[in-house]
Image: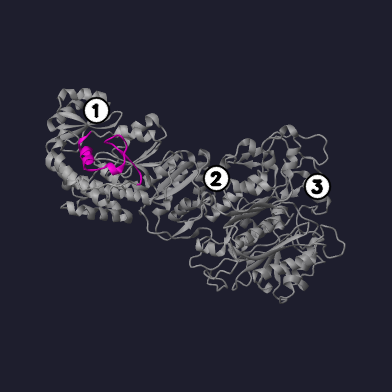
Amino acid sequence: MNGVDVALTAGKAEAGEIAVVGLSCRLPKAAGPAEFWRLLRDGVDATGEAPDDRWVGDTQSPRRGGFLDQMDHFDADFFGISPREAVAMDPRQRLLLELSWEALEDTRIVPATLRGSRTGVFVGAMGDDYAVLMSRLGQETIGQHTLTGSSRAIIANRVSRFLGLRGPSLTVDTAQSSSLVAVHMACESLRRGESTVAIAGGVSLNILAESTVSAWKVGALSPDGRCHTFDARANGYARGEGGAVVVLKKLDDALADGDKIYCVIAGGAVNNEGEGDGDGSGLTVPSRSAQTDVIQEAYQRASVDPTEVQYVELHGTGTKVGDPIEAAALGAALGTRRPADSPLLVGSVKTNVGHLEGAAGITGMLKVVLSLRHRLLPPSLNFVEANPDIPLDELRLRVHTHLADWPERSRRLVAGVSAFGMGGTNCHLVLAEAPVRGSDVRIPGGESAESSAPVVSSSVVPWVVSGRSESALREQARRLAVHVEADPGLDSVGVGAALVSTRASLEHRAVVLGTGRDELIAGLAGLASGEQGAGVVTGQSMAGGRGVVFVFPGQGSQWVGMAQGLLAVSPVFAERMRECAQALAPFVEWDLLEVLGDQEALERTDVVQPVLWAVMVSLAQVWQSLGVTPAAVVGHSQGEVAAACVAGGLSLDDAARIIAVRSRLLDRELSGRGGMASVRLPLDEVESLLARWAGRLSVAAVNGLSWVVVSGDADAVAELVSAGEAGEFRVRRMAADGAGHSAQVERIKGELIESLAGIVSGEGRVAFYSTVTGELTDTRELDAEYWYRNARETVQFADTTRALAAADYGTFVEVSPHPVLVPSLEETLFESHPAAVVTGTLRRGEDESEQLVAAVARLHVSGVPVEWSAGGGRKRRMGGVPPDAVCRGPVFPPLLYISETADVLILVVV
């Protein structure tokens, strides 16, 4: 941390310290923490005249304050809430849902990972403007959502319900100290072990004119609508609105998890003024002694010497009565023990955004969190001359009025935050800067992230984006493009890591693929405009059913040089290939890794089949390392050996023996004696066609509705191909010089069964669908006789595909060096299952790592869970990324109640 030697370092976390690991806010002129910091840093007064749709007709109270834009807007679909329920919901419930989601994103926690956890929700809120507003609509408008929508308790409970959280969930109302008390309660819950993570904050919205009139009549509001904290002009405060949320963890947990830590909460205290100072003052008059006590207790609990604190964020309402009492209490607790030349700096965020009442404490705390993070103190506004009733010099206090470095930067930075409720409940928290770590997080780019060795390294970087709707997806792409363009220091791999590790995968998805920053930004721009480029994969999360099916083809997917690229960039693939080579070694006279680039060798059946088996088994290992585990497997012809191995029915050694013996016998007995061809006709038409050749040709495989493979004598196959090329039908000669799955295979029956007699298959881990039987088959039945049938009988691939679809399997991955079965799979599946997902793995002659990343992208956008992080590897700075896009729209009821005294309701159609 700039070389500064501070008291706390990682590994020496003070007992009980709580880490602030995530932030969010929605404040006047600040839609998020970054905008809020700029507002504070630049000394912006965010108050202004009330929007035209607020308090029309009210002339009794000041119209100036801190207001949110589009306070009534909400994306109900994003949170799975019906339009009717959204209208019934207090806007504070809506706002807290948004802020909680954004704070978790800032924490780099995917919200779904907290489901069922002991995560607590602690929220400060006061007043019930919306409940009063809705009650005026009359009994006829009361519906099933009215009770929950207007209940203050549900503000917190709504978040717990949506995220599936099992920790404490409560809305705290201690008036103006509510949100800071909520944070204190969250810290205590974490310290007790009651919560493992806590979401804490506060929300406040100024909906009714009556609330402002009430504050005006009690003398709390400034006639000029500004807060002059500790100034001689102090005459009340301006009301503000908005909310803020922090995500908290125990410091040890945050350090262990590698979290970004903004600062720590060292301790805090809460008390009540009881009878006050015994001077007969009313309920709302603050107690100096109680405020002094709560501040002193906070530092005692935090084990922090009061002389170490350098700044205190005041409650600072700017009232004639409250300011002098707060100053005296603070001076007694912290100031008078300080040297005269080192006064305690103080300020109030209320001078920037107004008094957020139930959310005031968290707003002040957020200011301190950001100040500690940036090691800068922003100015407190509207201070010219001290209130004559506040002897600042005597109290050793100084109002901080300019942007400056934090004082005493050579020491650990420490600050306090105060919030006092009008009913006498006071709270003070002690905050300190985050501990030094070996690799700190830069601002604003992000933090270092380390992962284990990658499953595959690729020059292609995936940027994963999603949204609840198509429009939200495009907006998210636009936001990300703007965000990355604005920060040239962002690393494209780091941004990709943040997107896959810290953002929820919503229903509408896209993966932008590129080798560099410019290519990725261009892909985002195209996605945002609806013009999808070649490097963009899009889809909707619809993959369901019983899981993924791995499909292993027979001969035909091979190509010279296959797997060599992946060997160089995927340790997982390379290791499994070496294991396959060892398993094959007793049965073959060639080296697996050497023949991958040998064209002549790959033309031999006894080489190409074992090589394909090894490549497919190794690709399956890569897929599983990427989090894609098969629920079922199916193999086509020789592909059944790989399928049985991956299913767990065969050991690697036994599978190697089967494929080696099978291919050696087929090569010896069939090579040069026949051929095979693929005919694009339905099975019944093919069978009629083959009658011309009177038994010299037969059906070898039925791959789809109009995909039939024929095998037989070489001259008969040549005649068939000639007939097709003459225009009778579509036909393609296959790269095979033997008549597989024909009567010619009967020559190897005895020797094959004898050679495989000792193999005992076991019970598989996943479902094995046989293309010999066309149905689910117990792998314990895969004996030597079965493997003869596998070579001799017609491959019932189409029937087996239908059986899988009927069993509710909806996602199919062809695990091969080139997709040869994808077209027939699509033809068969889409007839009855149009939402089925079918993809290959690699493609002939294409960069294998790029093809694999693209295949992973295709599965991801369809809804299949994948472990994107497994594709990382190098230590990277995880780039900051914008929050998920929500499509907010107005959900207020079609009435706004304006006047405190009006007998006639003014209707405003929205």
Residue 206's x, y, as percent?
A: 72, 47
Q: CA distance from mark 3 to mark 2?
A: 36 Å
Residue 671 in sight here: no
Q: Magenta span covers which residues?
A: 765-793
Lower position in the chain sequence, tag 2 or tag 1: 1
Q: Amino acid at mark 1?
A: Arg
Q: Residue furthest right?
A: 280
Can you tell which quarter of the image residue 643 is in? top left
Q: What element does badge 2 sit on?
A: loop
Q: What element does badge 3 sit on?
A: helix
Q: Is residue 794 left or right of residue 869?
A: left
Can you tell which quarter of the image residue 85 is in? top right
What residue does disc 1 label? 730
What residue does disc 2 label? 885
Q: CA distance from mark 2 to mark 1?
A: 49 Å
Residue 107's x, y, as percent?
A: 54, 56
Lower position in the chain sequence, tag 3 or tag 1: 3
Is residue 660 on the magenta stretch? no
Label 2: how many residues lie within 10 Å, few (<14), some (14-19) or many (20+)? many
Residue at image position (30%, 50%) is 618
Q: Amino acid at mark 3?
A: Val
Residue 378's x, y, as percent?
A: 65, 62
Q: CA distance from mark 3 to mark 1?
A: 84 Å
* Res 317 label: none
Please state which of residues 220 and 635 is positioned toward the viewer in this rendering.
635
What residue does disc 3 label? 213
Q: Is residue 502 left or right of residue 74?
A: left
Is residue 778 on the magenta stretch? yes
Figure check: 697 above or below 65: above
